Image: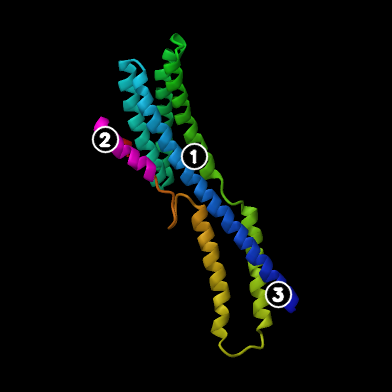
Amino acid sequence: MGIIQTATLTLLALIIGFTFSMAIDRHDQREVLEEAEANAIGTEFLRADLLPSNSTSAIKALLVRYLDQRILFYTEQNEEPLQEISKRTDDLETALWQEVLPLARSQTHAMLALAVSGMNDVLNSRGYTQAAWWNRIPYTAWGLMGAIAICANLLVGFGARNFTHNVALFMIFPFVIAVSFFLIADIDSPRGGVIRVEPRNLLQLKNTLNPHGAGKLSTSEK
């Protein structure tokens, strides 16, 4: 009985450790991609100066609006507003690409190619971010971890069936397991919970672009 109990507890500890590591890696990846997204938008904002003046002002205005929508993507938690944010972001991506597409077709110099490449990075960065937010710990892993946790608690309880003193101490083990599960689930959830992915770099970029015409979010864009 002691060998089985020890083996089960060891297996549970290993699985919790590996799952926690998976959640941390995914959280770090989302934060790195948020930084990359801010860098891509900021770089393209500067590269827009390489384009003709009328295209420069239009692209910069669109990038500022696009930046606002990306910030809302990170801060909004309700599903219905997120669908509207996604739709507005899609429309802005189409408008941004349509601004550079005629120039790319009519001219082939290196400066234009640099601006088009930067726009491509802006559009790609959103896809990478969305993929990372969809990349969660599989339900099968949660099921396996939960099944082993139940078995471990049953074995601990069965081993202490004749123990009558300080029975409350045996509540520590399921409490610790529950806290571990909560922490893993919270880290693995990028939008809800206590530990979230904050758009710090995007907000910093918005503050940097303010002197260039970036204002607060309008009511229609919230």
Q: Residue at x 37, y 36 (%)?
A: 69
Residue assigned mark 2: 210
Residue 47 badge: none
Indicate which disc, 3 or 1, sits on the residue closer to the N terminus.
3
Which residue is more in the foreground, 74 or 118?
A: 118
User: Badge 1, how many Cα within 10 Å: few under 14, some, many 20+?
Assistant: some
Please indicate, yes or no, whether residue 213 appears anywhere in the rendered image: no
Q: Residue 19 at what x, y percent from top left?
A: 60, 57
Q: Residue extending furthest front?
A: 110
Residue 88: quarter of image: top left
Q: Position of residue 167 (x, y in %)?
A: 57, 85
Question: In this image, 106 relative to 178: left or right?
Answer: left
Q: Quadrant of the N terminus?
A: bottom right
In the picture shown, does residue 213 fall above or below 104? below
Three-letter code, disc 3: Gln
Give percent across and percent down for residue 62. 35, 27
Q: CA distance from mark 3 to mark 1?
A: 42 Å
Q: Nearer the viewer, mark 2 or mark 3?
A: 2
Cα separation between marks 2 and 3? 61 Å
Residue positioned 44% across, 26% down in the render = 118
Q: Provide the residue span drawn in magenta.
A: 200-215
- Predominant secondary structure, magenta span: helix
> Magenta stretch containing residue 190, yes or no?
no
Q: Quadrant of residue 7?
A: bottom right
Q: Which residue is mark 1?
A: 129
Residue found at the very far top of the displayed protein: 106
In the picture of the structure, the residue carrying the numbered disc 3 is 5
- Left or right: 49 as drawn, with respect to 186: left
